Image (tube, coloured by chain):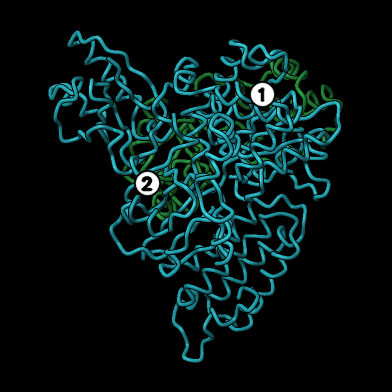
Amino acid sequence: MSQIQAFDADRALARIQELKHLDGALLPMLHALQDEFGYVDEAAVPLIADTLNISKAEVEGVISFYHDFRRLPPGRHVLRLCRAESCQSMGCDKTIAHVEQRLGVKLGETTPDGAITLRDVFCLGLCAHSPAAMLDGEPHGRVTPQVADMLIESAGRRQ
Amino acid sequence: MKIYVPCDAAALALGADKVAEAIESQLKNRHIEAQIVRNGSRGMLWLEPLVEVETPQGRVAYGPVPPDSVAGLFEAGFTRGGEHPLRLGLTEEIPFLKKQERLTFARCGITDPLSLADYIAHDGYRGLERALQMEPAAIVEEVANSGLRGRGGAGFPTGIKWRTVLNAAADRKYIVCNADEGDSGTYADRLLMEGDPFVLIEGMTIAGIAVGATRGYIYIRSEYPHAFRTVQKTIAIARDKGYLGPNVAGSGKAFDLEARLGAGAYICGEETALLESLEGRRGQIRPKPPLPAIEGLFGKPTVVNNVISLASVPIILNKGAQFYQDFGMGRSRGTLTIQLAGNIKHGGLVEKAFGLTLREAIYDFGGGTATGRPLRAVQVGGPLGAYFPESLLDTPLDYEAFAAKRGLVGHGGIVVFDDTADMAKQARYAMEFCAIESCGKCTPCRIGSTRGVEVIDRITANQERTRNLQLLDDLCETMVDGSLCALGGLTPYPVLSAVQYFPDDFRKPAPAPQDADASQEISSWR
């Protein structure tokens, strides 16, 4: 995830302006900001509100509603472990407990060195290869504790 | 010569990109001329990465192919279909595939998903061609007569929805594809969007021409980044080649499409929440009426259909309503795309006429549990579907037959659990999931789900069991009757079915002799 830039208000405004012609532009804008900076910075809220002529509260309300949008920068890597039914039937609880213990953080937290953000996800559509995971947007199947270890090590090597 | 290595996310999840790289480098080193095609998945997911080689006899399959076995395959002469322990024979002859009735998924895994030429060579755009020669009302009637019902879960007749939008007068109408496939155990939408995206675009174009809509949106969940990118590319190709835009296939009719990304909210799979989200708001439920067919996206008449419903339209138009109608049972016509998931030996997609029993799906196709342990429970239709015990496995996959057993065919996902499953834990999870994903609009769902977790915790801790079981029953009744949408309204189904069929799981740690039998306390369920 090395392409992520530090937040920059001018750059943010440019991305917002690029999308303002869309009908229902708010979600595309938030995705664009998160793609660019890794999260939606507080300072972007009034820029969006002004562009779309809606209140800041409305923008805040949308950001807080959706699980995807982050208010703080994530770790250098994001590891998402599925905990929906199909993955439960193949022991995802064991994988999750193992990863939490190994990284010393819980789901939803980032390791103190900023290397990995651990998140849950409810279904990646990889249910024939449960338990499933996604590391920096790439899918992984049959993620036993051993496979999870390999994923964490591969993320570590890439920095 | 062509070598096929799937680009489907399920194949990528097991190293398909590395396999393709290894094949490419072997071809180069051995000076073999061959083209690597990144096809969609055939749906035999336990065999992924499934590599196919074109031979004079037909396509020969090898799988599952780990990246480090590629050199050995070349040693065995696999480019000529040579013998190897991973050789599976002709792909089309593999029983899992051969026994299916592939209508909607006819091309998936065969073609290059991004090749319009491939699509057209395999009967693509014939449905649109015929539709363009018909009156809009006749197209709608063709779909109505086919018996197609919404494949997203609700099973509402697609033709009736289209007719309502056709008859609604408005300056603008929309086609919205619900690709927010959030149910665990389902992946048919993803497989289709990554494996044969043109068929979805053709289906939406036909829908637009039928009801008089000029604009469409495909709302894809963010958990499917590969599907999103594939669909975006496909839309660009279709537009470039004149299949989307102001003059669809030279007909003078306009229709254009845009793919939009969700943001991790399960509730946006509910059609009115999806519309809110598309409009740029919190994905909260709208009370119905008005129906989206009358006042939908941006207040305009809108067809909201699932991916599989829309992708079934081209073959209906191409081969006629009767052809499609001839598959199925009772009022469930056509084919169901069954997705075998969870603790299953042969996980994958089975497209088959309605009427296959759960047992046939799980054992004849799926080969039983992955762990080899006895099957304990099956959840069909996602997180809102009931948990069925072994004794209900002979239920045919049919909307009405499932409803009669208080089950849900839903989107056709089947999640199998072996005998290590703790059904009280599954019931608790159902409530927990509802609490996490509730949009907050109505009280039974928003508050009831949290209270549900607490009551189940008290039951399993043996605190006032009888009273708490009755309370759970009352709570579920309130949620079923009082919720605005299916999330709050159906969450009680997995909960109460777990209590009814697996009462012993709710008496841990140690049952007292005078303990109430959990299944006796849930009157609203029976």
Decide: is B392 above or below A25.
Answer: below
Who's the residue at 66% across and 11% down the image? Answer: B250
Where the C terminus of chain A falls, by quadrant? Answer: top left
What letter labels the chain drawn in green?
A
Q: Percent from the top left, x then y, of residue A121?
A: 53, 44
* Residue B377 in sight: yes
Q: Which residue is mark 2?
A: B347
Nearest the eye: B138 or B474: B138
Chain for disc number 1: B
Decide: is B130 above or below B245.
Answer: below
What letter labels the chain drawn in cyan?
B
Residue situated furthest bottom in the rendering: B514
Q: CA distance from mark 2 to mark 1?
A: 32 Å
Q: Label 2 sits on what residue type?
A: Gly
Residue B360 placement, left or right of B385: left
Q: Which residue is mark 1?
A: B258
Residue B402 placement, left or right of B419: right
Who's the residue at 60% across and 21% down the image? Answer: B129
Numbered disc 2: secondary structure: loop
* Residue A83 in sight: no
Which comes before the other along the chain, label 2 or label 1?
1
Who's the residue at 77% across and 33% down the image? Answer: B279
Q: Label 1 sits on what residue type?
A: Glu
| Number of the label disc, if any, that sits on residue B61 | none
Corner quadrant of residue B16 = top left
Chain for disc number 2: B
> How busy is the neighbourhood of tag 1: few (under 14 within 10 Å), some, or many (20 plus)?
some
Nearest the eye: B367 or B169: B169
Q: Percent from the top left, x then y, of residue B523?
A: 63, 79
Decide: is A65 above or below A55.
Answer: below
Numbered disc 1: secondary structure: strand
